[in-house]
Amino acid sequence: MPLKITDVKAATVEGNYQWTFAKVYAGAQSGIGEAFPAPQLEGVIREYAPLVIGEDAFDVNRIMDKLRWASVPSGTFGANYHAFSAIEIAILDLLGRHLNLPVYALLGGKFRDKVRIYADAHAGKALESMSRVLLPTVPLWMRELGVAPPEAVEREPVHGRATPMAYAEEYNSRAYGARAKELKGEGFTAVKFDLDIPTPYTTRHSQETGSLSNQETGYLAGLVGEVREAVGEETDILFDLHWKYDVNNSVRLAKSIEPYGVMWLEDPVPPENVSLLREVTSSTTTPIASGENLYGRYQFEQLLGTGIRVATPDAPKAGGLLESRFIAQMAAMKEITISPHNISSPIGTVAQAHLAASIPNFGVLEFHGHDVPLWYKLSKKKVIRDGFIQLDDEPGLGVELDEAVAARYSLDGEFDL
């Protein structure tokens, strides 16, 4: 029997990122998905709704093909793909609930029901909140913790070469080591830190040009060494550069941390030209990871030929769970590990856990909400236990959004799912 789609809705909650949800209805039944942040994303999802309404939810591949072709005039990638991804995840959740099957069963079944998580420790401090254009924000949940809004409006993005950053004690090796020990004590078997940070030797010139002096390189390598010493060899350690540095300095830094056996060094060079990665990967034994900026199988096909050891698609951005599983199959042919990037709420996080369960070459899934009290309140059940997500046979995604909580912390006070 067909399962006719009758409505598509969208709404956003302000967490440490702006979590945008799509809800797809088939009469009284519904499923929920989540999109990676992008400006005006609710409106994009609603623009595509007429292409989805009236379709049979079982024809999910046909629906996604329609959405991709409909995006040709406005640009195939970017916010359009974010919207598609949320709609696709919501349709799979709807189908799973309708059929009384977990989403991983719709993806071909599971290799594992316990999905390993790594904690993103950021830069050794509690995570801040940012808008969809990476401006710092102070949403309600932060104000409830006593964080005061800034006196002046910030006009610089949180990441990148355009933003001046000042060294602070939170960027020293003691802070990194202590944070790593804390997270290991909570049961996490892998932890990640930022390395695109200011050091005591950073100059405005080096920030603007993506360069590193010998002193800066030594300092950053020292942070890696401190984290390794803090957690021992049994815990995996990962580091993120957020595309901050040029090829030469990315190579210098990657080579300087080779002795510490890191699981990977992530996104060393600007993402627009994936061929730059080949220059980095061919010059170091440090494993390089990348992929969170890319969309769909064709962009990932180029990435997988650069020598990276780990691909990091973000399913709420890359085209949804089915497309990300296709990307994982392509990667498996080259023995490349898939470790999904993830800054989602519990909805998107569990969705990517279903993906992780369904692929043979899964590594570890990102958790980016450790220090955000709201993250834990949005789900009606505990999602992460001792550094893992345990998937069961509950239908659909198996996680429910607490819509009363979501409404309280919604963007601009609007929440209609």
Image: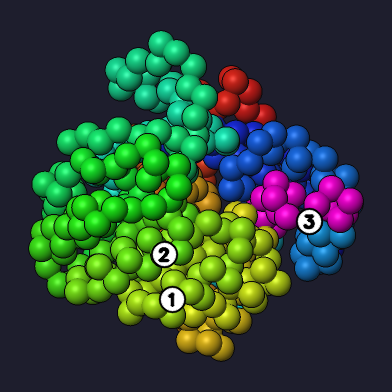
Between tags 1 and 2, which lies in front?
A: 2
Quadrant of the snapshot with the N terminus: bottom right
The three-letter code of the residue at mark 3 reads: Thr
Residue 41, placed above or below residue 328: above
What number is the disc on residue 281? 1
- Residue at the spot of label 3: 76
Q: Which image quadrant is residue 128 in?
A: top left
Tell me the crowding category of disc 1: few under 14, some 14 to 19, or many 20 or more residues within 10 angstroms, Cα based: many
- Queried whether the magenta region covers residue 328, the answer comes back as no
What residue would you read off at disc 2?
248
Instruction: Please provide percent x and percent y for residue 298.
Output: 70, 72
> Is disc 3 in contact with disc 2, using a CB cutoff of under 8 Å?
no
Spatial CA span between label 1 and label 3: 29 Å
The residue lying at 75 percent from left, 35 percent from top is 43
Q: Please state if 71 lies on the left or on the right of 150 as rendered.
A: right
- Lower position in the chain sequence, tag 3 or tag 2: 3
Residue 193 is situated, as x and y percent measured from the top left of the image, at 30, 53
Dot placed on the residue nearer the N-terminal end, 1 or 2: 2
- Horizontally, residue 354 falls left or right of residue 249, namely right
